[in-house]
Image (cartoon, grey):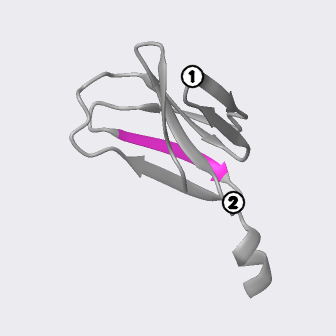
């Protein structure tokens, strides 16, 4: 039972502190990401959510693993490794 619990999908909530109220800003969790300093790079965008007015993005049914969190704000990709 413990092994099954370790691989069970979870709800993941990302909170961006002091995020300006931009309702419905797209947010992504990507298993594969190759950011580029000269542009947006490559992001697999495996899971999608919307950032709400409080700065929270809620992703449902996410399997355990390592993901890159990113948002697209005013056409520009902002990302955090994780």
Residue shown at 68% from the left, 38% from the top: 34
Query: Does any portion of residue 79 appear in the rendered image?
Result: yes
65 w.r.t. 6: above or below: above
- On the picture, is 63 further left or further right than 39? right
Q: Nearer the viewer, residue 45 or 48?
A: 45
Q: State which quarter of the image contains the C terminus.
A: bottom right
- On the picture, is 27 further left or further right than 43? left
Residue 62: % across, % down? 66, 53
46 w.r.t. 15: above or below: above
Residue shown at 46% from the left, 51% from the top: 13
Q: State which quarter of the image contains the N terminus.
A: bottom right
Residue shown at 71% from the left, 38% from the top: 46
Q: N-terminal of the two: label 2 or label 1? A: 2
Question: Mark 2: few, some, or many residues within 10 Å (few <14, many ≥20)?
Answer: some
Residue placed under numbered mark 2 in the picture: 9
- On the picture, is 76 further left or further right than 39? left
- Give the dominant element type of the magenta stretch: helix, strand or loop: strand
Q: Which residues are magenta?
A: 56-61
């Amino acid at each position: 039972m413990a092994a099954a619990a370790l691989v069970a999908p979870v709800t993941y909530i990302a909170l961006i502190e002091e995020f300006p109220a931009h309702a419905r800003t797209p947010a992504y969790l990507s298993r594969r990401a190759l950011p580029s300093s000269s542009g947006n790079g490559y992001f697999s965008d495996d899971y999608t959510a919307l950032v709400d007015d409080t700065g929270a993005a809620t992703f449902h049914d996410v399997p355990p693993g390592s993901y890159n969190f990113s948002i697209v704000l005013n056409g520009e990709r902002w990302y955090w490794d994780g």
